[in-house]
Amino acid sequence: MRCAVLRHEHSTGAIAQGASPARYIRWLRRLLVADAPQAYWDTPLSRRAVAAIAAGMGNFLTTRLDEVIGDPVRVSDDGIVRRVTVLGAFVYAYDRAERKAWAENIDRNGEWQRFDSDKKTLRIAFVTPLYKPAWRKVAWQGLHASARAWLQAFVRDFLPSVCDAMFDELFHHVWKRSWRSAGPARRLRGIHTRALRHQIRAALALDERLVDLARAASLGRDPILQDRLTFIWRHYDVLERIRLQTPKLLAPVTSYLIRCGMEDGKDPVQAFKLWLRKQGIKGSAFRLLAQQGERPFRAVVRRWESYLAFDALVLALKLAQRPNGARPLPWRLCKPLFEQWVDTQLPDFFLRMAKALPERFFDVLHRAAERASTRYPLDAFLRNEFGLVIDWIVAEPLRFLPLERKSWACWLSHARAFRERRRAAISGPGWDSAIETWHEGQVTATALLSPLMLHDESALLHHCVHKFANDCRSGDARYFSACMPRGGREERATIGLYRGDKGWAVHDVRGICNRHMDRVWWKFAEALAREYARCARAQPDELPRGRSGIGEVSMPASKADSQPRQYRCLSILLDEAREPPGRNS
């Protein structure tokens, strides 16, 4: 036992730190018991011993990292299962007998676990390998697990039974010191990922025909994960026949089969067509997809993450339908159209909206947008006209139904009348502001001094500033509407100030759809907060202290509560209104 302790002390440099073996063992035994007081960690001997162990762990991490970087890819193959271990932290593997591909990663406790492809932050792609986007985090977990195992072996030599909580405390102190001294983070950032990807692809030795089919069956930017590769491998003959007969439908049909499964005895293309019909997609949109593939719909599909590509394609097919055929939504209309709501909404939200609206709505919208592009920019048309019509249809569907066959101008006139009725219903006292209007260079900020002004700002920029009228009345917050000429257009934002213990400060700066604004806007907001604090100190009355902010993402103010729920209610109301009244109604 004593020789083992001396060997470990020599490896950690504890003798160089001046700690004798006997005192060193007594310190660790006293520290790693269950009832050890926290004051033991503050003694000089404890700090010297932690530094000694940290130096040894730093040497171990440096050696381990040299091994990992020197030989980053290791292959084991028994003729049936092939495993490719990368950086000692994650594994690509496949079974030739079962035609199954899987991936494993190591956690920070050193346990290997099968990779979950439903996660959105860490995903394994077999054709373009490496984790996306945080493969270095998994490499860090591998080093963390190796360091923990090293410390466990070190402590077990002289103390077989250790309290888990105290061991975790010791490892926490030692790990922080050794990680800073070894500096492996800088070395991990220096790994050239392109060369490493080439090594992984060569080590996997996948069949090129399978890789080509997997690439052709990918929808949009959808990466080829282990579950997708397994499905394509097991149904290679069926998918290859689809590629030969209807190549444009290969990617959509594959995504449909992965989601809904493949039924025995049924043609996958016909099953996909029948499923689309149940979703409200007509034959004209399906024929357009079969002739041109998903390429005309990329403006819609690529607005969402790759795992939502199939839902986005169904949405694009729905929006492409016209009363006299199908025509894809143009790319110049997609961006401002979807930016009327928050970017994080799923395509399912827009599908519910499209189902609730009449068939000719988007056809009328498309023609009106083409005429509007000659008068003013398209985003202004969607903000000033399209948003008003949507608000009116959502809030008053029963008034909209008799006018369903009318023109866009008729819809717009009723929507404007609805907006005036909604604005007239908003009541409540206003409040004073130390600054009403302030100019700084080309930026102008105007104080929002009433609930009606907050409502108009919320409807214009599509966030929830209208919810904070009570905070403004009590003096907890002040909000300003600011505009700045930038890039040939006018950029708008809402600036929120709150009064804390140190005076007025900036709480948030948000643009349309609650978008985060850049540093230029924040500098202007900070200057506005300083000016407002100076003017507020000059006023005799003191406002109560508090805190508020723009806060969560919201829809336009006329869409009061939960937007998806409103659209579900809209769909129900439209169905009920179209049905003739019953005999007992």
Image: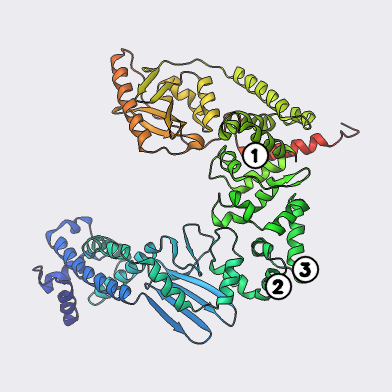
Q: From the viewer's perspective, is residue 504 above or below residue 570? A: above
Lower sequence index among marks 2 and 3: 2
Q: Nearer the viewer, residue 7 or 92?
A: 92
Q: Secondary structure at mark 3?
A: loop
Which amino acid is tagged 2?
Arg
Quadrant showing the C terminus: top right
Q: Where residue 161 sits in the image (x, y, percent)?
A: 29, 72
Q: Indicate left or right for 113 with 521 as reference.
A: right
CA gap between label 2 and label 3 equals 14 Å
Q: Secondary structure at mark 1?
A: helix
Lower sequence index among marks 2 and 1: 2
CA gap between label 2 and label 1 equals 43 Å
Query: Which residue is the site of mark 1?
Result: 565
Query: Which residue is the site of mark 2?
Result: 241
Q: Where residue 70 sits in the image (x, y, percent)?
A: 30, 76
Q: Nearer the viewer, mark 2 or mark 3?
A: 2
Query: Which residue is the site of mark 3?
Result: 266
Q: Where residue 45 sits in the image (x, y, percent)?
A: 13, 63
